């Protein structure tokens, strides 16, 4: 339970750099962030960049979010 809360907070902080993001968009990438970018320090667009580098492995929902961010 604790790790799920921390992961959700991590996703909210890390993807919040793009202020137009909705909770739904952040939720679309939460599993992908945990799977592919867990060791990346949030801030400065690092999580978004990490996800963009893994684009071919992401869930369809997260791919849409990344594309919408121009990555």
Image: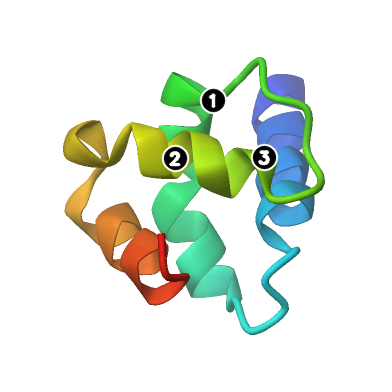
The answer to which image quadrant residue 40 occupies is: top right
Secondary structure under tag 3 reads helix
Taking 38 as reference, is 17 above or below it? Answer: below
Q: Dot 1 corresponds to which residue?
A: 37
* Labels 2 and 3: the sequence-earlier one: 3
Secondary structure under tag 1 reads loop
**Viewer can see residue 31:** no
Residue 67 in the image: state x and y as whole percent: 32, 67
Direction from residue 16 to residue 60 in the image, left or right: left
Which residue in the rendered view is the most extreme toward the bottom?
A: 20
Residue 38 in the image: state x and y as whole percent: 60, 20
The answer to which image quadrant residue 19 occupies is: bottom right
Which of 52/37 is in front?
52
Which residue is found at the position 40% from the left and 57% from the top? Answer: 28
How would you rate the neighbour count of disc 2 (Cα within 10 Å): few for under 14, some for 14-19, many for 20 or more?
many
Tell me if label 2 and label 3 are in contact, CB under 8 Å.
Answer: no
Tell me if label 2 and label 1 are in contact, CB under 8 Å.
Answer: yes
Direction from residue 12 to residue 25 in the image, left or right: left
How would you rate the neighbour count of disc 1 (Cα within 10 Å): few for under 14, some for 14-19, many for 20 or more?
many
Secondary structure under tag 2 reads helix
Which of 26/64 is in front?
64
Which of 44/26 is in front?
44
**CA distance separating discs 2 and 3:** 9 Å
Which residue is found at the position 27% from the left and 41% from the top? Answer: 55
Q: Quadrant of the N terminus?
A: top right
**CA distance separating discs 1 and 3:** 9 Å
**CA distance separating discs 2 and 1:** 7 Å
Q: Dot 2 corresponds to which residue?
A: 51
* Labels 1 and 3: the sequence-earlier one: 1
Q: Dot 3 corresponds to which residue?
A: 46
Which residue is found at the position 21% from the left and 32% from the top? Answer: 57
């Amino acid at each position: 339970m604790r790790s799920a809360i921390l992961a959700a907070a991590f996703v909210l902080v890390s993807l919040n750099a793009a202020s137009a993001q909705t909770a739904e968009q952040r939720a679309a990438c939460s599993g992908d962030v945990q799977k592919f970018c867990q060791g990346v320090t949030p801030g400065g667009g690092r999580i978004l960049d990490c996800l963009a580098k893994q684009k071919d492995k992401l869930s369809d929902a997260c791919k849409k979010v990344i594309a919408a961010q121009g990555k």
